[in-house]
């Protein structure tokens, strides 16, 4: 059973349909107690960092997620803002603390080439680390759908699982043990994206 | 390439010519599945009637598509309030297109971008070229001339927080005469947000020109994919061969 955190920010409907499509049962978790009966967690997210972290806190999800992910070791997959909120800090509209699960911060994408537009929206090629559980099935670099104006800047490469290029490298995926995250939307990236979701669902620590 | 402007009226998919003549194509959902199978990059569903009465049909279509098609969906047509947006997003829409309501109440762009994030809000701009070579923005399905200059309006929309712009040439719509590359370039150069150009694609090369000459971030089309044996793969190959980095296969 995969639990999808519903905190009012994120395309819960399409994420849940995609997870069902790849063959897993889904539970929409509207409050922290709902996380009791799931084996894996997906944290979607669309919108601004500070609203996301405040809402998660307000609804009691922060403590529940810390407990299940950091202590119990439940696998979790953060999508887009859902991944960004796992970082230490964000500099979007001020300075805000994230969940602090990986060493990195959220900073704006600022290409020097004026022809490159913000948000970074569209399909982009993802280069991945060998033996990455999410990406190992691909023979060549897959294209995934991105839509974001802020990016994850990792303190070092140890948690970097994949990157794409938009003038310079942008973190496309992170991984730290049972914690996974992608900047792109697997539920919007057609067959390739669905395979990434499937790989997460099939993964065991 | 960003594919498929769906002009959807009730449960029927239509294409239009100059926003006036309407040709019925068929079921929007089955057509969406075909486009998805042919590897369209995104789908845009526009309710041309833009009426409150159609809203539940539109919602049902979006919901049904979101259950089985896993590419980005942009939905528009008569979106006037924050609640309109909430409902569509909850039913599977990824992005919302606003057009007439943005012109009538520009603050709606600011409000919705703040509430849902800029990347969720696409402002659609329909325009006509006057005989003296200047352009004007039209609203209400091309029925009302606002007198606004599309370049200035685009700049204003971007400032207010629009995440993307989708521009459409009314006189080229459905004609296959090619995109209006001139205004596409002027708008693309004027704003730092992505611009989707549409209206008039008739040849695969029209798409490529949209990127290379017009500087568009994406190209949308409806009529092009509805009548002949034109597939996304053929157009994609052409665009790639012309030097534009576009994904070739799923």
Image (spheres, coloured by chain):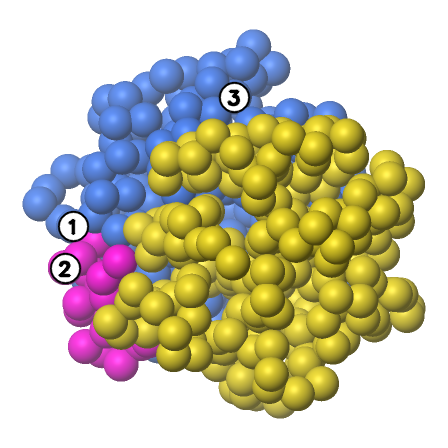
Chain colours: A yellow, B blue
* Residue A109, position as x, y percentages in the image: 66, 77
Q: Is residue A186 above or below residue A176?
A: above
Q: Residue at x 73, y 62 (%)?
A: A86
- For mark 1, give the secondary structure: loop
Kindly identify which residue carries mark 3. B59
> Across the whole image, how many numbered discs are drawn on residues?
3
Report the disc number at residue B52.
Answer: none
Q: Which residues are magenta?
A: B232-250
Separation of residues labelled 3 and 1 (CA atoms): 27 Å
Q: Residue at x 27, y 22 (%)?
A: B27
Q: Is residue B142 above or below residue B47?
A: below
Q: Is residue B50 left or right of residue A61?
A: left
Pick out the residue farthest to the left: B229
**Chain on which label 1 sits:** B
- For mark 3, give the secondary structure: helix
Is B242 contained in the magenta span? Answer: yes
Check chain identity for marks 1 and 2: say if they share one.
yes
Question: Does any portion of residue B200 appear in the rendered image?
Answer: no
Q: Residue at x 52, y 21 (%)?
A: B59
**Circle nearer the N terminus (2, 3):** 3
Kindly identify which residue carries mark 2. B234
Quadrant of residue A83 in the image? bottom right
Kindly identify which residue carries mark 1. B231
Foreground residue among A184 and A93: A184
Q: Is residue B53 above or below residue B104?
A: above
* Residue A34, position as x, y percentages in the image: 71, 29
Q: Residue at x 43, y 79 (%)?
A: A129
* Residue A63, position as x, y percentages in the image: 85, 47
- For mark 2, give the secondary structure: helix
């Amino acid at each position: 059973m995969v639990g999808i955190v519903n905190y009012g920010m994120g395309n819960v409907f399409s994420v849940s349909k995609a997870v069902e499509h790849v063959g897993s049962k889904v539970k929409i978790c509207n409050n922290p107690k709902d996380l009791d009966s799931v084996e894996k967690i997906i944290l979607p997210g669309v919108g601004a960092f500070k609203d996301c972290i405040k809402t998660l806190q307000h609804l009691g999800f922060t403590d529940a997620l810390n407990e299940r992910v950091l202590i119990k070791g439940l696998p979790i997959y953060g999508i887009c803002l859902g991944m960004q909120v796992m970082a230490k800090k964000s500099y979007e509209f001020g300075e805000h603390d994230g969940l602090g699960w990986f060493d990195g911060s959220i900073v704006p994408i600022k290409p020097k080439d004026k022809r490159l537009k913000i948000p970074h929206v569209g399909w982009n090629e993802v280069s991945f680390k060998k033996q990455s559980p999410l990406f190992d099935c691909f023979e060549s670099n897959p294209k995934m759908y991105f839509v974001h104006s802020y990016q994850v800047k990792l303190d070092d490469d140890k948690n970097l699982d994949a990157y794409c290029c938009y003038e310079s490298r942008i973190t496309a995926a992170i991984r730290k043990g049972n914690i996974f995250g992608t900047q792109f939307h697997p539920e919007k990236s057609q067959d390739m994206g669905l395979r990434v979701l499937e790989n997460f669902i099939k993964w065991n620590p | 390439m960003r594919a498929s402007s769906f002009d959807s009226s009730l449960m029927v998919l239509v294409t239009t010519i100059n926003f006036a003549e309407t040709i019925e194509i068929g079921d929007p959902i089955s057509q969406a599945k075909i486009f998805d199978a042919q590897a369209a990059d995104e789908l845009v569903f526009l309710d041309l009637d833009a009426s409150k009465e159609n809203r539940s049909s539109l919602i049902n279509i979006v919901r049904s598509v979101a259950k089985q098609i896993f590419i980005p969906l942009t939905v528009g047509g008569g979106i006037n309030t924050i609640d309109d947006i909430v409902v569509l997003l909850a039913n599977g829409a990824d992005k919302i297109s606003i057009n007439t309501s943005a012109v009538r109440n520009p603050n709606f762009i600011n409000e919705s971008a703040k509430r849902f994030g800029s990347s969720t809000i696409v402002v659609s701009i329909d325009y006509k070229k006057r005989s003296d070579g200047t352009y004007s923005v039209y609203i209400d399905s091309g029925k009302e001339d606002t007198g606004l200059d599309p370049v200035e309006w685009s700049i204003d929309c971007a400032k207010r927080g629009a995440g993307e712009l989708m521009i459409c040439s009314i006189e080229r719509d459905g004609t296959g005469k090619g995109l209006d590359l001139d205004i596409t370039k002027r708008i693309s150069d004027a704003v730092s947000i992505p611009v989707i150009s549409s209206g008039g694609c008739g040849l695969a090369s029209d798409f490529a020109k949209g990127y290379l000459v017009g500087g568009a971030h994406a190209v949308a089309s409806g009529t092009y994919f509805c009548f002949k044996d034109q597939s996304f793969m053929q157009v994609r190959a052409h665009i790639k061969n012309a030097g534009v980095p576009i994904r070739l296969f799923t």
